[in-house]
Image (tube, rainbow, N blue to C red):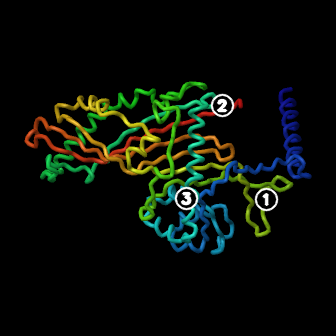
Amino acid sequence: MKKTVFKSIALVLVLVMMVSAFTACGTGDNVERPQEAKIKTDIGDVIFTFTYGDLRGVLPGEKLASLFENTNKKTDDKTVSISYYELVSKFGSEEYFDSILNLIPEEDMKKFTSNTKEVLDYYNTLINGIKADSGSVRVSYRESFWINHGDGVVFTDLEGNELEGQKELRAAFRLYADTALKGIGSVLNNRGQDEATDFGADLTNEMYVFGSKTASTLTVADLYTNAETKTYPAYTSLTPTLEFDLDEKGNNAKGEDGEYIFVPTDWYRTVSICVKPEEESVKKAFSVREQDEVLKYFDVAKEYMTVNSFEIAFEPCYITAGINAVSDQMTYCTYDKNMIVTMNITFSGALEKYGTVLVTFPCTDQMVFDFGWNTAE
């Protein structure tokens, strides 16, 4: 009896599979082709086009293949379009990165500065809109601080003369900094790190600039550029999400050249902004802590050395925002506040012989805001 039941079920399943297969290969009435997504705001995103032949002389085989993975016939005239942000992400740390950039015509490099105001206005509108209309979005955030140890850490006497024993001093400072940062962790957590606000919450003290009703009052005059170091004031890059187009039978569609056809079903935009290393400009988009607020957290390592005072000189600071370009909804915003700090410190214990000295070091305070949108809208 059970065998008869199992055979009947198996027969039904076979029939269902046959009907499904026949339908997929039929007239195509039920084929759902991917819907092409459109960009909501066109602001001249930085995208470069390279030929296979040009890149073949620059990139190693596996890197080249990854760029042209959707290309069947890899002839020298085949092209690939890639955003600058993606270009940096893939190859920025490679020794051949400059060789790739040298393939870009000078006219195309002007894309970095030709629409700076439009990009900044776009960013300001989105980030200020989030802070003003918190009912549509909830915000979570986390903060990180790190010191760039190494040759950038320099010890001098109070007159500015470099001290002997830099290696020993740097080792001691690393130990001190690692210990002190455990204390600083408490101030970094004081804003509810990795906790999200509720929809409708007041974001005045939850988003940069803390205490202000706006998140950015940056103008073009506040931005920094240095073509020699590939530093640009404000630009955007677009990256599509591609899916195979389908033919009437539900198969992956091909064009006349035999290549598969892809449809952009989503567009993701990255906005990159570089702020001048001037306090007046930095404070228009970043929050800066007062000296007394920071100094008390260095007391945890006072058996090694004591911080008497410090001064901050800003380096170019960066803002990077991720945006759904189909809806113009920002998904995250990262602030990298780069600084050169000079501390007046007094050594204790084994290093007491050095007395009171100045130590200068580069460091970064990074704040990341993630935005979750109300899907009910």
* SS class, disc 3: helix
**Callout 1–callout 2 Cβ contact below 8 Å:** no
Q: Residue at x 48, y 70 (%)?
A: 99
Cα–Cα gap, marks 1 and 2? 36 Å
Of badges 1 and 2, the one in the foreground is: 2
Which amino acid does the dot numbered 3 rest on? Tyr
Question: Which quadrant is the C terminus positioned in?
Answer: top right
Q: Residue at x 68, y 70 (%)?
A: 73
Image coords of residue 246 (percent x, y) = 80, 54
Which amino acid does the dot numbered 2 rest on? Asn
Q: Residue at x 69, y 50 (%)?
A: 39
Q: Residue at x 83, y 27 (%)?
A: 2
Q: Is residue 106 above or below residue 32?
A: below
Q: Is residue 78 above or below residue 207?
A: below
- Is residue 279 in sight in this rendering? yes
Q: Assess disc 1: are there few (<14), some (14-19) or many (≥20) residues with their C-alpha within 10 Å of its C-alpha.
A: some
> Which of disc 2 and disc 1 is earlier in sequence?
1
Image coords of residue 203 (percent x, y) = 53, 29
Q: Nearer the viewer, residue 57 or 286?
A: 286
Cα–Cα gap, marks 1 and 3? 29 Å
> Where is mark 3, residue-wise?
84
Image coords of residue 304 (percent x, y) = 17, 35
Of badges 1 and 3, the one in the foreground is: 3
Q: Assess disc 3: are there few (<14), some (14-19) or many (≥20) residues with their C-alpha within 10 Å of its C-alpha.
A: many
> Where is mark 1, residue-wise?
253
